[in-house]
Image (cartoon, helix red, strand yellow):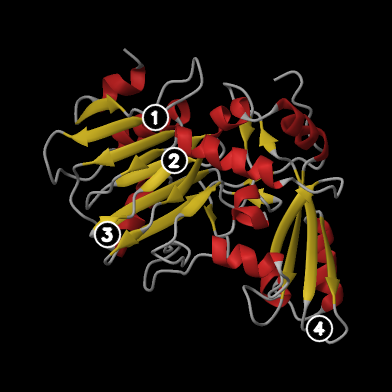
Amino acid sequence: MTAYLDVLQRSYRPNELAVPTVAGAPPPLLLTALHRGAKAISHHEVTGIRDALTHRGAVLIRGHKPLDATGAAATANQLFPDEPVFDTGEHPQVEDAEALYRPVPFAPEQTLLWHHENSFNATFPRFLIFVCKAPAATGGATTIVDSRLVYQNMPSEITGVLGSEGVRYTRLCTPHAGRSWQQLYGTDNPDTAQARAADNGETLTIDRDRDRARIISVRPAFLPTPHGPAWFNQLLHWHPAALPEGLRDLVRRGAIPAFRTCDIGSGDPIEDDIVHRLLAVHRAHEFPVSWQPGDVLLVDNTVFAHGRNSYRGEREHFVRMVGRQHHPSTLISTTNW
């Protein structure tokens, strides 16, 4: 028996989740507390859970009592005491709870497509902690997808091009949508902002009136993992072909600007049929985590993408992101992976 399972089975019933994974990679683990509403996680269990997360890519802990914001923050501190907290700047902070956030506001009736947190930026979190205080009345599952499978199932012509060219992200900043360039770079000074952008491998162009700006960056499309390359980008959040139908039509007709777009690193377009293929691959391999109060889901952000199904009713979750990793300054060839 694996060492971490030997430790964890003293307090949990371990079961493998039916998540599709690549050959040779163990599936994510469900740990159900042997006693409902059990005590807090012990130090030895923390070590076992962290080891399980390293090997499995995702771990769902079930059976502890429901947590409020204070309890969720304390649990995250307990599980990752040695990892720096990561703030994307996009997630609303929970009041009176340090470094604890709520999911990004997104229409409940819409499906939030699969993505890797902050993969379009120079730095990104390694691990994600999701805590369920109250699940939705209907729907609202968090969906996870093994991105190594996504890579394997995408056409070689697109993985080859993206492997050598990367993904080119273009972001339009205006006072009417999203965050301003001043918020993104933490300054009102254009020269300082442009220097900080350059440090992040980005090109920042600010209009004369300092009201609008455009940010362009090229990032790797994949990351190496022990079981092969993983699809690691936010193409499905930036490409117009992945927008909801009504919004997509407005962008196509030029009725509203495309605030976020992406292309191949060379500037050549990513064709719509590639996006449609990508959507189909994610749907074919996703696993829905149907929430129960008190559930804690741990995800390796470099291996599993996550999304969210539509829902009805109130849904209250907490999020913390920890660890800090950097994209390489140059693209990595995938030919030897």
User: What amino acid type is highlighted by mark number 3?
Assistant: Ala
Q: Which residue is situated farthest in the left direction here?
A: 35
Q: Is mark 3 on a helix, strand or loop?
A: loop
Q: What element carries label 2?
A: strand
Measuring from the top left, give residue 336's x and y in whole percent: 74, 18
Measuring from the top left, give residue 188's x and y in whole percent: 76, 81
User: What amino acid type is highlighted by mark number 1?
Assistant: Val
Gap between marks 1 and 2, in whole Å? Answer: 8 Å
Q: Which mark is residue 144?
A: 2
Mark with earlier residue (4, 1): 1
Q: Is residue 266 left or right of residue 270?
A: right
Gap between marks 3 and 2, in whole Å? Answer: 18 Å
User: What amino acid type is highlighted by mark number 2?
Assistant: Ile
C-beta proximity under 8 Å, tags 4 and 3: no
State which mark lies toward you, 2 or 4. 2
Residue at which label 3 appears:
136
Q: In which quarter of the image is the N terminus?
A: top left
- Write the residue at 35% across / 16% down: 2
Q: Residue 19 carries which label?
A: 1
User: What amino acid type is highlighted by mark number 4?
Assistant: Arg
Mark with earlier residue (2, 4): 2
Q: Quadrant of residue 337?
A: top right
Mark with earlier residue (3, 1): 1
Q: Residue 210 carries which label?
A: 4
Mark with earlier residue (4, 3): 3
In the rendered image, the vertical position of residue 334 relative to residue 255, given as above or below: above
Res 99 seen here? yes
Gap between marks 2 and 4, in whole Å? Answer: 40 Å
Q: In which quarter of the image is residue 29?
A: top left
